[in-house]
């Protein structure tokens, strides 16, 4: 409730000033992400569910909330992109938005929400986002990598260098290893599909869903 109130008040403030920072998300989806077949298909699937798109952590009161330490957060009704990314180039922002939309799809359209977040889920989502970037450009230029921003260090804090991951895409194994390292160390996610399959704490339905994830 507190989060919703902060976002609502922030939107009212910008609307009264004739600005709405959240509109940039829609603009990037339309003018960047949907220019690719991958992005267009994903956007269409997600927008059928009509989630609210917004930047979070835009007010000083919200800076210390746990959500403000993440690149994005999704729930069934909202897709929140960290407000720090307002300073990023459209290409970079679309990469973050793609990940958020894909996670939303996996959880709330493909029904993986019944599982705890696994290393494999995060790896699959990240890999899909790299396929998206490869459909955008053949080389990653430093000017679009928010990680290199001279003043805003948020991309460095969350370990999200577009160019580093893009260059690693030449080797799927190196990319997977790097994604998993970030998932385990920064996101502190340790649960794997194997853990679910071997544990008696999970239902038959959950184990079947875990096997489905493993086959993707």
Image: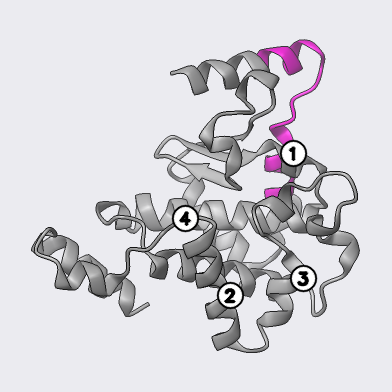
Mark positioned earlier in the residue sequence (1 or 4): 1
Marking on residue 24: 1
- The residues bearing labels 2 and 3 have C-alpha atoms spaced at a distance of 13 Å
For the residues labelled 4 and 3, say whether their Cβ atoms are less than 8 Å apart: no
- The CA distance from mark 4 to mark 3 is 21 Å
Q: Position of residue 93 (x, y in %)?
A: 72, 52
Is residue 43 visible in this depiction of the protein? no
Q: Is residue 105 visible?
A: yes
State yes or no: residue 25 in magenta: yes
193 or 211: nearer the viewer: 193
Q: Mark 3 or mark 1, which has the lower sequence index?
A: 1
Going from N to C along the chain, the mark reached first, 4 or 3, is: 4
How far across and how far down the image is residue 28, in percent? Answer: 73, 48
Check disc 1 and report its element: helix, strand or loop: helix
Front tag of 4 and 3: 3
Give the quadrant of residue 95. Answer: bottom right
Mark number displayed over residue 44: none
Bounds of the magenta span?
Answer: 11-29
Residue matched to label 2:
178
Residue 103 has which mark?
4
Residue in the image at 64% along x and 18% along y: 61
Q: Residue at left 43%, top 42%? A: 49
Instruction: Give the main secondary structure, helix, strand or loop, of the magenta stretch.
Output: helix
């Amino acid at each position: 409730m507190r989060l919703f109130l902060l976002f609502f008040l922030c939107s009212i403030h910008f609307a009264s000033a004739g600005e709405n920072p959240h509109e940039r998300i829609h603009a990037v989806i339309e003018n960047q992400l949907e220019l690719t077949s991958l992005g267009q298909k994903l956007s269409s699937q997600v927008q059928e569910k009509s989630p609210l798109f917004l930047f979070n952590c835009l007010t000083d009161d919200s800076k210390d909330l746990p959500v403000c330490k993440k690149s994005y957060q999704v729930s069934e009704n909202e897709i929140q992109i960290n407000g720090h990314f307002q300073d990023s180039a459209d290409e970079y922002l679309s990469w973050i938005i793609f990940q958020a939309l894909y996670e939303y799809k996996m959880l709330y359209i493909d029904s993986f929400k019944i599982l705890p977040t696994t290393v494999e889920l995060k790896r699959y989502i990240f890999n899909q986002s790299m396929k998206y970037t490869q459909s955008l450009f053949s080389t990653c230029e430093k000017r679009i990598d928010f990680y290199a921003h001279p003043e805003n260090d948020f991309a460095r804090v969350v370990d999200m260098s577009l160019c580093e991951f893009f260059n690693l895409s030449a080797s799927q194994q190196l990319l997977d290893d790097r994604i998993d390292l970030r998932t385990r160390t920064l996101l502190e996610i340790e649960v794997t599909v194997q853990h679910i399959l071997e544990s008696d704490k999970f239902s038959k339905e959950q184990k079947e869903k875990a096997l489905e994830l493993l086959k993707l």
